[in-house]
Image (cartoon, rainbow, N blue to C red):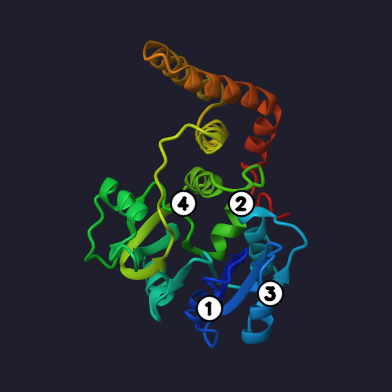
């Protein structure tokens, strides 16, 4: 039987922890929980109700990527065959992991596989996930991996060979962007990412749409820019030129419609990226080494 480590990062997970952990068959799989300094009763629940789970309590919030890296190191050091990343607001069906492993063994070129992500409140495929399905023309009746450029890391199966080569998540992304960056690095090392539509899991996140230009807008734009600038599949100078062209076009667009607020935000983003340019260059180099961010 394959040795599988299910890695769950928690932070104030009271509302989700029971559904999440109860869905993990701890007779078949090992659960490894990294708690990011929760201030609610998450740790008490874990210790009292889930004695089989391996729990690591942090004294500060490391963010999604660095916390998952703790579990990835544990998997490397303890001879696991697969790791499964499971969001605290996600849960599994009894055969979710089993179906993904069967598909991965038949198609070992796939280094990251996701089940079809469902959402109970939405009554079907989770809305954000449906975007990936539509974009990549995913057929819901196929039990073989269907290739995608990216799928979010709420429910990821990865063979240990992927971890040995690609490594862990880049800590330059404290929250959001780290999974897109990881997908870029998988592609750099000639691995594939895919969806197995006959395997299902549930991701119970809420999708909020906000058109107000605020700090969240700036944060998302900075993350998107850093992901693009750090993508090691692109040549550094060409990447800079392409993004500069993008910023110029955006600036002209918002000048024409007199959206000075947007222009100010993009000006801030440019200054931020300029200040981070050496760090981005350094992390591009690190990402081209095996087991990056885990050694």
The residues bearing labels 3 and 4 have C-alpha atoms spaced at a distance of 36 Å
- CA neighbours of label 2 inside 10 A, class few (<14), some (14 to 19), many (20+): many
As drawn, the label of residue 191 is 4
Asked if the residue under mark 1 is in contact with the one under mark 2, i.e. CB atoms within 8 Å, the reply is no
* Residue 190: image location, x then y, percent: 47, 47
- CA neighbours of label 4 inside 10 A, class few (<14), some (14 to 19), many (20+): some
Does label 2 or label 3 sit earlier along the sequence? 3
As drawn, the label of residue 169 is 2
Left or right of residue 127, residue 85 in this image: right
The residues bearing labels 2 and 1 have C-alpha atoms spaced at a distance of 26 Å
Does label 2 or label 4 sit earlier along the sequence? 2
Residue on which disc 3 sits: 43
State the residue at coordinates (42%, 64%): 204
232 or 206: nearer the eye? Answer: 206
19 or 143: nearer the eye? Answer: 19
- Which quarter shows the C terminus? bottom right
State the residue at coordinates (40%, 36%): 211
The residues bearing labels 3 and 1 have C-alpha atoms spaced at a distance of 12 Å
Asked if the residue under mark 4 is in contact with the one under mark 2, i.e. CB atoms within 8 Å, the reply is no
**Residue that sits furthest to the bottom in the current view:** 27
Secondary structure of the residue carrying numbered label 4: loop
As drawn, the label of residue 18 is 1
The residues bearing labels 2 and 4 have C-alpha atoms spaced at a distance of 16 Å
The reply to whether residue 124 is in sight is: yes
Q: Is residue 203 above or below residue 271?
A: below
244 or 294: nearer the eye? Answer: 244
- CA neighbours of label 3 inside 10 A, class few (<14), some (14 to 19), many (20+): many
Does label 3 or label 4 sit earlier along the sequence? 3
Asked if the residue under mark 1 is in contact with the one under mark 3, i.e. CB atoms within 8 Å, the reply is no
């Amino acid at each position: 039987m394959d040795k599988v480590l299910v890695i769950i990062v928690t932070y104030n997970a009271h509302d989700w922890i029971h559904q999440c952990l109860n869905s993990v068959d701890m007779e078949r799989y090992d659960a490894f929980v990294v708690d990011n300094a929760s201030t609610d009763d998450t740790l008490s629940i874990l210790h009292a109700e889930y004695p089989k789970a391996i729990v690591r309590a942090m004294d500060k919030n490391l963010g999604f990527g660095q916390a998952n890296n703790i579990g990835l190191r544990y998997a490397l050091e303890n001879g696991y065959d697969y790791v499964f990343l499971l969001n605290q607001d996600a849960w599994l069906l009894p055969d979710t992991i089993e179906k993904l492993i069967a598909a991965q063994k038949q198609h070992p070129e796939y280094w990251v596989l996701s089940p079809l992500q469902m959402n109970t409140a939405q009554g079907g495929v989770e809305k954000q996930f449906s975007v990936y399905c539509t974009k990549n023309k995913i057929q819901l009746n196929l039990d073989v991996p269907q290739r995608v450029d990216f799928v979010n890391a709420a429910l990821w199966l990865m063979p240990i060979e992927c971890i040995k080569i690609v490594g862990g998540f880049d800590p330059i992304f404290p929250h959001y962007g780290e999974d897109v960056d990881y997908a870029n690095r998988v592609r750099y090392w000639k691995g594939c990412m895919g969806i197995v539509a006959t395997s299902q899991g549930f991701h119970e996140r809420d999708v909020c749409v906000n058109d107000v230009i605020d700090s969240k807008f700036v944060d998302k734009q900075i993350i998107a820019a850093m992901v693009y600038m750090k993508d090691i599949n692109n040549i550094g100078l060409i990447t800079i030129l392409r993004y500069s062209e993008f910023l110029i076009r955006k600036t002209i667009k918002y000048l024409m419609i007199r959206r000075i607020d947007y222009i100010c935000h993009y000006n801030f983003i440019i200054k931020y990226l300029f200040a981070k340019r050496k760090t981005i260059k350094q992390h591009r180099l690190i990402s081209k080494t095996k087991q990056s961010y885990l050694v």
